[in-house]
Amino acid sequence: MADAVAKGQDSAQSIPALLARNVARYGGYPAYREKEFGIWQSWTWAETAEEIRAMALGFLSLGVERGDYIAIIGRNRPAHYWAMVAAQMCGAVPVPLYQDAAADEMAYVMEHCGARFVVCGDQEQVDKIVEIEDRIHTITHVTYTDKRGMRKYDHARMNALEDVQREGRAGHHRYETELDKRIAELDYDSTCVMLYTSGTTGKPKGVVLSNRNIIETAKASSEFDHLNHNDEVLAYLPMAWVGDFIFSIGQAYWSGFTVNCPESPETMMIDLREIGPTYFFAPPRVFENQLTSVMIRMEDAGKLKKRLFDHYMKVARDVGPDILDGKPVSFGRRISYAFGNLFIYGPLKNTLGFSRIRVGYTAGEAIGPEIFSFYRSLGINLKQLYGQTEASVFITQQPDGEVRADTVGVPSPGVEVKIGENGEVYYRSPGTFVEYYKNAESTASTKDPEGWVATGDAGFFEEDTGHLRIIDRAKDVGKLADGRLFAPKYMENKLKFYPSILEAVVFGAGKDRCTAFINIDLTAVGNWAERNNISYASYQELAGHPRVYEMIREHVEEVNASVAEDPMLSGCQIHRFLILHKELDADDGELTRTRKVRRNIIAEKFGDLIEALYAGRDEIYTETEVTYEDGRKGKIKATLRIEDAKTVPAGPMAEAAE
């Protein structure tokens, strides 16, 4: 495999080597764009290489040594991506962190990796470092990208990143020989990046990924979807997430395409429409929110417009996916779809920013079949993938023409996948991580000597298609008191298919029945309330409204009816539920920064609510500590209703299985 990569111009053994290749191959093409103050700025591959080299020279002037760890904290900006590549040029290891992480979360990561240098996006991130630097004694220098608000800080060990670049340019004669030497030392086994896991069950682990992991994965996945230098992506996902790294650096450097950075999270949707990416990734929640927004607008539209929308969307649902997959469709239906594209689908895709998408992916959670089909019916090539940080993202992908809502595809090129005796999914590939940093025990328990990695997910391959289906997290799959299978994530995903349900947490392991906490989606339910003349003053008041409970109960009962037909999971029907008085929040420790439920913490924090669900009570008074945006702590007091939901006797298939 290494021999194949080593041929010709594709023999690059590191990200800096790929950068040099791209300068020679795509030097005048745009590499990065950034919107600032409402104006898009652009850098070609040649200009990008010059910026990165100046930054690397500047890092050497600050004293960056081989093996140092450089933490990078901030929003998606070209300078932050450049810092990661410049760090590798110096023989250092970039460690991106979540910009919305609290200071204490950052402290753990920086202390664990021993970060000596920090690149901050703005004053907010610098303040977090100032707050914790007394505890993190390894930090020797802090740089920042945005100068606003920084004038009165102590600059003895603090500089603007552009000043560091300026120092690098000024001192290039002193540092160029050393920099070239360090770049030449990089090979396939050199560390490319260290990314920390979300830490759903404990402290985050530092996942060490080599150049081999990133480049081989980028090559295989790019070729799978025929990505090239004409493609465009929007870099808006957290830089600390492995998906953003593989899309915005790995695949970008392999394929030579353009990475576009939005001005802010608030302008992301506007910037998305302006760029019109050809290659796009979003978690299901983004697609769900966009669809909710479309449906809300259509509810407020005039009768003629609504009638046209409903008519042509029916046409799209009937034939759109078949046209997209190249399947036979009658001439008349194609004409009808073409009119729909002219009047409805085309303008709608343009409004969403999806007019030019050639390849789209979603992953991280299950996406509702209706939502998935909606986008594909518009002619958007939306697919699913399954991956992990430890795999450099890609484990399985859906090939064109084999796209379905209920599977995550076939093994990605170069990836082997097998199912263990306990139903757990295992894989090995060139993208398999090197190790967990300073954690040999976890490395050994996750990756065996033959390179097989335990994903922690339970699933199975369909015999007829070879597609993988994921059921749940293996550690969460358990048994009810009567021995029937309990898979909470499966149920939670089905509940979250409804736009009015933002989050769900299901309980039942070792119990005689399943119960659930529900978080409503304030935007979706708030718009529904306005249309139905329901007034409310807060999330808590809306969540406790009788008609909201009635709507959520209907959703729960619909899910129960669906699950009743499943041979394995009919016992997971939800008997009782309550709507939480607050949204689950990462700042309160209830979710990870990637919005994964911390089940154990929730069970401990809301133990009184769980007890009430199983005690048959109709309501319960509770007090909950919350963290406000400015970091202050407070308490929310509420009396929560507890509702019963109708369950359905197991269907014929389920009865036969039992």
Image (cartoon, grey):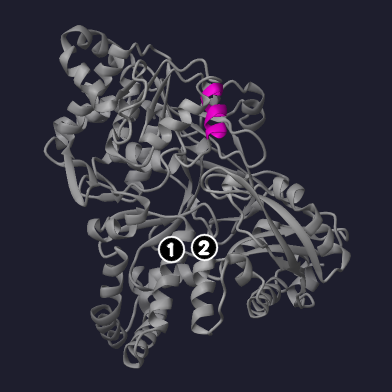
Give the residue type that dot 2 points to.
Answer: Ile
Residue that extends furthest to the front in the rendered view of this protein: 152
Residue in the picture at 16% in, 15% down: 170
Residue in the picture at 68% in, 43% down: 420
The residue segment tinted magenta is 103-112
Helix, strand or loop for disc 1:
helix
Residue 194 is covered by the magenta coloring: no
Helix, strand or loop for disc 2:
loop
Q: Is residue 544 visible?
A: yes
Q: Is residue 475 visible?
A: no
Residue 179: x %, y % from top left: 26, 13
Horizontal side, residue 261 vs residue 641: left or right = left
Residue 219: x %, y % from top left: 34, 38
Q: Residues within 10 Å of mark 1 (few under 14, many from 20)?
A: many
Task: Name above or below for residue 356 compared with residue 228.
Answer: below
* Residue topped by disc 1: 287
